[in-house]
Amino acid sequence: MHNPFDLLLLFQDRKFRPYWFESGSPFFLIRMLKAREVTLSTLKDLAQQEVVAASLAAFDLDYISTAALMFDAGYLT
């Protein structure tokens, strides 16, 4: 598996580095969850919910659902 962003950085810098690890910080997600006052029980409830595909199509961060945000971040499947 490869990450296209990592490959672009490799070609730009012309050296191997752990780009994937350096760019994989969840700080953005943590800030969003804190701003929404999401609790652990809320996250546990999300894991039990069935989400329709249309709700995962939102890309506006002001209006994206917490379920879609967690799905896009790879924490829900």
Image (cartoon, rainbow, N blue to C red):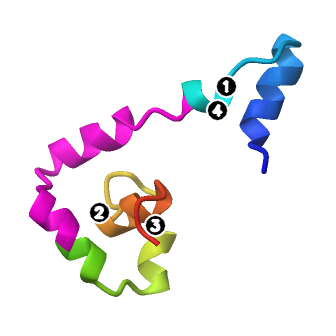
Q: Is residue 50 above or below residue 34?
A: below
Q: Which residues are magenta?
A: 23-44
Mark 3 and mark 4: Cα distance apart in space = 25 Å
Q: Is residue 76 toward the left or the right of residue 12 in the image?
A: left
Disc 3 residue crowd, few under 14, some 14–19, many 20+, Cα 10 Å: some
Q: Residue at left 40%, top 66%?
A: 68
Mark 4 and mark 1: Cα distance apart in space = 4 Å
Q: Residue at left 48%, top 58%?
A: 74
Residue mark closest to the camera, 3 vs 4: 4
Residue mark closest to the camera, 4 vs 2: 4
Residue 42: x and y, percent?
A: 14, 66
Q: Residue at left 78%, top 45%?
A: 2
Q: Which residue is mark 4?
A: 20
Determine which quarter of the picture holds residue 17.
Answer: top right
Task: Check residue 58 in the rendering and tell me which mark sits there, or answer none.
Answer: 3
Describe the element under mark 4 as helix, strand or loop. helix
Q: Are marks 4 and 1 in contact (CB under 8 Å)?
A: yes
Q: Are marks 1 and 3 in contact (CB under 8 Å)?
A: no
Kindly identify the amino acid type of the residue bearing the numbered disc 4.
Trp
Q: Residue at left 64%, top 32%?
A: 20
Kindly identify the amino acid type of the residue bearing the numbered disc 1.
Tyr
* Magenta-colored segment: predominant secondary structure: helix
Mark 1 and mark 3: Cα distance apart in space = 27 Å
Who comes first in sequence, dot 2 or dot 3?
3
Task: Check residue 19 in the rendering and tell me which mark sits there, or answer none.
Answer: 1
Residue 58 belongs to magenta span: no
Task: Check residue 51 in the rendering and tell me which mark sits there, or answer none.
Answer: none
